[in-house]
Amino acid sequence: MTVARDAAGAGPPESPARDLDAARLAAWRAVRDAGDTVLERISADLERSSGLPLDWYGVLLHLYRSDDGRLPQHELERQSRLSQSGVSRMLSRMQQAGLVDRSPSQRDRRNLDVVLTDHGRDIFLRATPGHHAAVQAHFGAWLDDNETATIIRGLRKVVNADDEGRHGVETELDQLLAFGDSVLDLRSDAVVVGDAVRTRDALEPALLQDAAKYITRDGVDQLRAIVARMSCLIDAPEAFFTADWDLHRTLAAHCHNDILRTVYLALLDILSSHVSSVVPTANLKPYLYQRLAIHARIVDAVAGGDPDQVAAAAHAHHFTDVRSRLINRPD
């Protein structure tokens, strides 16, 4: 399409818009098709890992990013791909699951505000690492750094949005790691730390079996002293996990397989050196008591030296990983 100039030779002001050509039409179709395909795959992974549909996760994300965990319902309707009635039904189910509440708006009593509950915040934080893992598997893993930068630059121009504030929150969420039923805030590289945790879990049964063969009475006393220290640190979660990792280093010291011990300790160091803090969640204190009991069981099993008891204790210590569901949705 061309624009005719007037008699004076002037035309409309220059615009960044261009005529639609075959390449740009193909680019649009690629964005549309990739979006549909990737959303479907991420949604399936997220629902398997946490029980949260992707639309529910999106609502929790919007509420979490808001200043006070509260948004007008009509704002969520505007941001959603669902119809107004579809959003209302979804929010009703989320309310039954304890993730959100609805109350008369503080700004306009004729309308409703949707409020993030403490339970909803906890579920959102614990589901976020699984969400990010799905995004990496079905989107990020297929792009190199140059392609990623080009996509960001191009699509930000398309939406023409000033998203600096939201980007800061997204970056904060990028560093969360589900650590059993707790959530760790990392200094960097959640993917590497997650891989280190899973690999350490895989090596741990063999390391504990070897330690059980060679543990000394002094070694058992040292382990039990660390468990006693952990029992005093329930209200200090960062210190609790530091003591937890000290316990595992002490166990590793009694493993006579040099290669296994060296790799295990290196993986443990990756985890401990990257943790910035433990995210406060409603379930954290009961969970730490549970972990305390599991570690006491490990020490007893290693001290007793029975291979079956050691194997059972090692299994109990393994985290309920991203495949465990966080919520049971009402029908």
Image (cartoon, grey):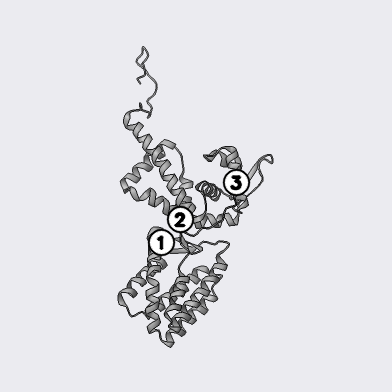
Q: Of the residues tagged 1 and 3, which is closer to the observer?
A: 3
Label 3 close to label 2 by CB (< 8 Å): no
Which amino acid does the dot numbered 3 rest on? Leu
Q: Which residue carries the number 2 mark? A: 130
Residue 42 position, x and y percent, is 44, 49
Q: Which residue carries the number 3 mark? A: 91
Residue 152 position, x and y percent, is 38, 43
Identify whether 243 is placed above or below 189. below
119 or 68, which lies in front?
A: 119
Residue at 38% from the left image edge and 52% from the top image edge: 137
Residue at 32% from the left image edge and 48% from the top image edge: 145
Which amino acid does the dot numbered 1 rest on? Gly
For label 3, the SS is helix
Q: Which residue carries the number 1 mark? A: 194
User: Where is residue 105, by image quadrant?
Assistant: top right
Which numbered disc, 3 or 2, marks the residue that appears first in the sequence? 3
Q: In this view, does 17 lie to the left or right of 301?
A: left
User: Is disc 1 surrounded by few (<14), some (14 to 19) or many (20+) residues within 10 Å?
Assistant: some
Residue 277 position, x and y percent, is 48, 63
Q: In this view, does 222 lie to the left or right of 263?
A: right
Which amino acid does the dot numbered 2 rest on? Gly
